[in-house]
Image: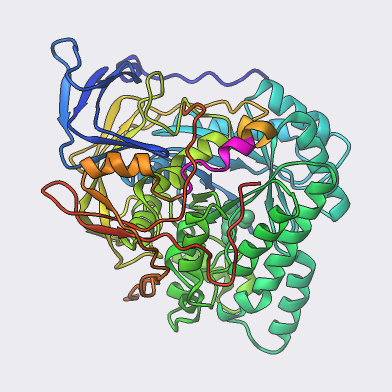
Amino acid sequence: MSTPVKKVPIHLQSAQNRLLIKNGKIVNEDDVLEQDVYIEDGIIKQLGRNLIIPGGTRVIDARGKLVIPGGIDPHTHFEFEFMGITSVDDFYQGTKAAIAGGTTMIIDFVSPKKGESLVDAYYTYREKADNKVCCDYGLHVIIPQWHDRVPQEMAALCSEHGVNSFKMFMAYSFMLTDSELYLAFENCKRLGAVAMVHAENGAIINKNTERLLAKGITGPEGHELSRSEEVEAEAVNRACMIANQVACPLYVVHVMSKSAGLALVQARERGCRVVGETLAAALACDGSQCKHPCFQHSAGHLLSPPLRSDPTTPQTLMTFLAQNDLQLTGSDNCTFNKTQKELGLSDFSKIPNGVNGVEDRMSVIWEKGVHAGIIDPCRFVAITSTIAAKVFNLYPRKGCIGIGSDADIVIWNPNQTRTISAKTHHHAVDFNIFEGMECHGVPEYVIVNGRVCVDEEQLKAVEGFGNFVETPVFPPFIYDIENAGKLKPSNNGILNDLIAEKLAKAEIEPKTSVTPTLPDSAVSTPSCKGPRPEGQRNLQDSTFSISEDADVERRSCIRVKNPPGGKSSGFW
Ligand SMILES: NC(=O)NCCC(=O)O
Ligand SMILES: [Zn+2]
Ligand SMILES: [Zn+2]
């Protein structure tokens, strides 16, 4: 079989090929620039003020707005066959929702059946996705079972099919044993691939589930009881230990608890190279939602690892992100409708696991991170876009606003608000875990490969406009140890002097004292009615605020030295 060839209608190939974004403030992960952006044929061609550009170019005025790299969601499951059913957001609806929220690239997971060739499963996904995606996409491949052909298939996916990442499970019926994980990580290391792991102790979950059901605990509240924080943290620790035996860098997906976050910090202190991802869901919701008397509400919030009962979890995870103890965010968008969730009405272990997030991730993280004063706009860009681009070796093509980069750009209005609701979202699913949450920060324009796909907040996504993007092996961010050292002090969420100076022009005043206080609970209570080169700067912990003028609303961004119960660590 050869790589699928996508047929994009001619009129879509170079739509709106010239665009100038004027008067905005470009925010990259490490810098803020007062520059205009000129785009031609989907690529950023010029940056600066007073650019000389061809006549007939469309001009968008971004005065008072931030011009940021489009979000990259490294964790979605569209049309995912899981627990006997298929998630309802397909590659069209899912990527359309992504764009509506300011995400311009997603990376989904090929999910081979046990015994199926990984390469065949990859083709199945390409066929499902290529003509549906509204934005660019990449693919990770799940390894559901270890057998002799797997190493060869992994090698073929890396060398011939543009895949550089594999996900292994430590729970569910397709979990791998420790020795199989060892082999999988060893192969990832040999190929220069990113080893991703779903870290929960599957054997203990199975035993707990049997015990809970036998006791008559059958509702959604049983879900977290069966997979407590230590069940997650133990697996994180074990995965890090196993990866370290073969010196394989590790990416832990969906870190959902303080205990798991701390396990990562401790592993890194022992010398393990590990990247930690958390989810929009975990940053905005807590486990109390799964105890709600309405089944649609409680089951609607059910995913694995679960939202945690400890109500300080969302803020702590955000603080981990601020301190680079966690590095990036995904959505794990895996949506099931009410009727699908009802498969588990009398047995929580049969409720399909998964929630929405691809549309609201950017707004939710802005709200709980920047608006709440825990991270600055540069760190927002890092954790929603740049670090994903670096980990999966897409940087600087994606994840930054630079000359030569893809024109995947969001014009972000931090002064605008919107209220999230299933009634207005663009997903196929009938429920939204962020229902009723008011978010400051709205994507007014979303530009996907140079095409304006959200235009003054109006969604104009085009089915099939996106392309499959190959992810090359040996991402320097995780494989080049020397560079990894240099990346460590990249904008660590802290406003350094130079950025402070630049933002000062854009209304930022550094403060002198550190106030290690966190804002009041960031937990939402939804209602239920049914190429950045060398020279990364050293950053000191500091407190700063963005002062108000005509353009930018006042924000107080607080750096906290140590997370509650934890200690900041370096990147590796
Ligand atoms: N997370 C979840 O509950 N569903 C999606 C599958 C996975 O990522 O484990
Ligand atoms: Zn998972
Ligand atoms: Zn997932």
Q: Is residue 59 visible?
A: yes
Name the quadrant where ligand 2 sits. Answer: bottom right
The percent coordinates of residue 204 (x first, y second) are 77, 72
Whether 9 is among the magenta residues is: no
Q: Is residue 128 visible?
A: no
Give the camera-side residue of 553 and 172: 553
- The part of the chain drawn in magenta is 484-492
Q: As drawn, which residue projects farthest toward the bottom?
A: 215
Classify the position of the N terminus by image quarter. Answer: top right
Give the camera-side residue of 378 and 1: 378
Asked which quadrant contains residue 21, the reply is top left
Q: How many discs mark residues in the rendered view?
A: 0
Give the camera-side residue of 125 and 40: 40
Determine whether 569 is above or below 69 in the image.
below
Asked which quadrant contains residue 357, the reply is bottom left
The percent coordinates of residue 189 (x first, y second) are 77, 35
Whether 488 is among the magenta residues is: yes
Q: As drawn, which residue projects farthest toward the left?
A: 550
Q: Residue at x 32, y 45 (%)?
A: 500
Give the camera-side residue of 327 and 199: 327
The percent coordinates of residue 129 (x first, y second) are 50, 34
The percent coordinates of residue 322 (x first, y second) are 47, 55
Q: As drawn, which residue projects farthest toward the front?
A: 512
Q: Residue at x 46, y 63 (%)?
A: 560
Determine whether 243 is above or below 128 in the image.
below
As drawn, is 451 to the left or to the right of 492?
left
Asked which quadrant contains residue 66, the reply is top left
